[in-house]
Amino acid sequence: MSQNNNKGLQRELISGFSSGVFTILATHPLDVIKLRLQLSRESHSSYKSIIKQTLSLPTEGKKNRFLQFYKGLGINLVGNSTSWGMYFFFYRYYKDLLSPLSSSNSTAYQRDKKMTSFDYLSAAWGAGFTTSFLTMPLWVVKTRVISINNHEKHTISTSYSKTIKQIYRTEGLKAFFRGLVPSIIGVSQGAIYFSIYDTLKMKMFIHEKERSLSAFETISITSISKMIATLLLYPIQTLKTNMQDHGMQNQNMIQTIKTIYNRNLGIKHFYKGITANLARSIPATCITFYTYETVKDMI
């Protein structure tokens, strides 16, 4: 691999990590609401009821009840920043492998211009698969921490280290990879998103030399790409979240699908929380990619 490629991978890692940090700090409360909606055992739970329920949860000492919306922030911050850093790193790595100019001393822009939408899709899927496998334990612990007091109060410690120990002691090592299958299937959402994003980005540059995206261009491309990808594959995200929940640790994927369907009277529960998800994910992805593009241009 050329020196240009190595420098490009370092830029991707730093830019992706930075974008993950900024995004989570801005959007974590909406992530908590979305996750609690997905885990709700009530078929008619709403955003308003979830917010009230979250605010009514007991706090330690004189802590502000609004801090409940930042429950699990630590592991979410670590998980997302690490995931984004790794994702962009591997996405660039796989794109370099697939590009017709991979063996030449070309720039990343020149290599990307020679790629097709299917190349982007393949590279993004590879990056998503690799990142999902390596970070799955973080998301299992995050889900358990946020879901505490959502049901079965006091069964799991809010301490990350104690939660990890309890999961390992009661469910074994495999519990840290619960939801891996739907997560890998769900990688398709990221693959579709990145394929649309890079295709639109290259279409904008088709008659131009390499330049930076404007803020408006980044936000427009990001919003379109994210909305399409989310609407197509949101049910898989709901399935993964429920599989990682403490209340379903003894069910496989098919059993979990049946439980969700029967418990909530139909298919609509698989889209439960999608409004909160879009309200969070579109601005979050805009923040992520604007930060990513900005930091990458600065390095």
Image (tube, grey):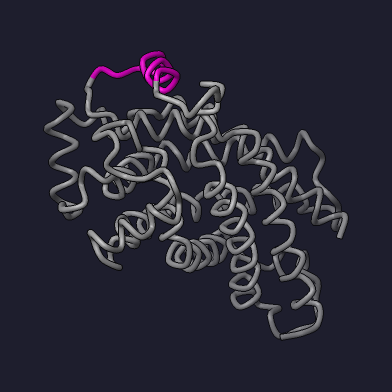
Foreground pick, 140 / 104 = 140
The image quadrant where one finds the C terminus is bottom right
Q: Is residue 97 left or right of residue 130?
A: right
> Residue 151: where, in percent of width, then height?
26, 32
Q: Main secondary structure of the magenta part?
A: helix
Q: Is residue 290 left or right of residue 136?
A: right
Position of 215 relative to 207 (above/below): above
Instruction: Tell me the quarter of the picture where residue 6 sits.
Output: bottom right
Q: How many marks?
A: 0
The image quadrant where one finds the N terminus is bottom right
**Residue 55 belongs to magenta span:** yes
| Residue that extends furthest to the front in the rendered view of this protein | 61
**Residue 204 belongs to magenta span:** no
Q: Is residue 241 left or right of residue 11?
A: left
Position of 194 relative to 129 (above/below): above
Q: Is residue 187 left or right of residue 110?
A: left
> Residue 95: where, in percent of width, then height?
62, 70
Foreground pick, 154 / 182 = 154
> Residue 80: where, in percent of width, then height?
57, 51
> Residue 232: where, in percent of width, then height?
39, 41
Position of 295 relative to 216 (above/below): below
Instruction: Tell me the quarter of the picture where residue 170 sits.
Output: bottom left
Q: Which residue is painted at 55% across and 25% down in the image?
A: 63
Write down the region rendered in magenta: 44-56
Foreground pick, 140 / 108 = 140
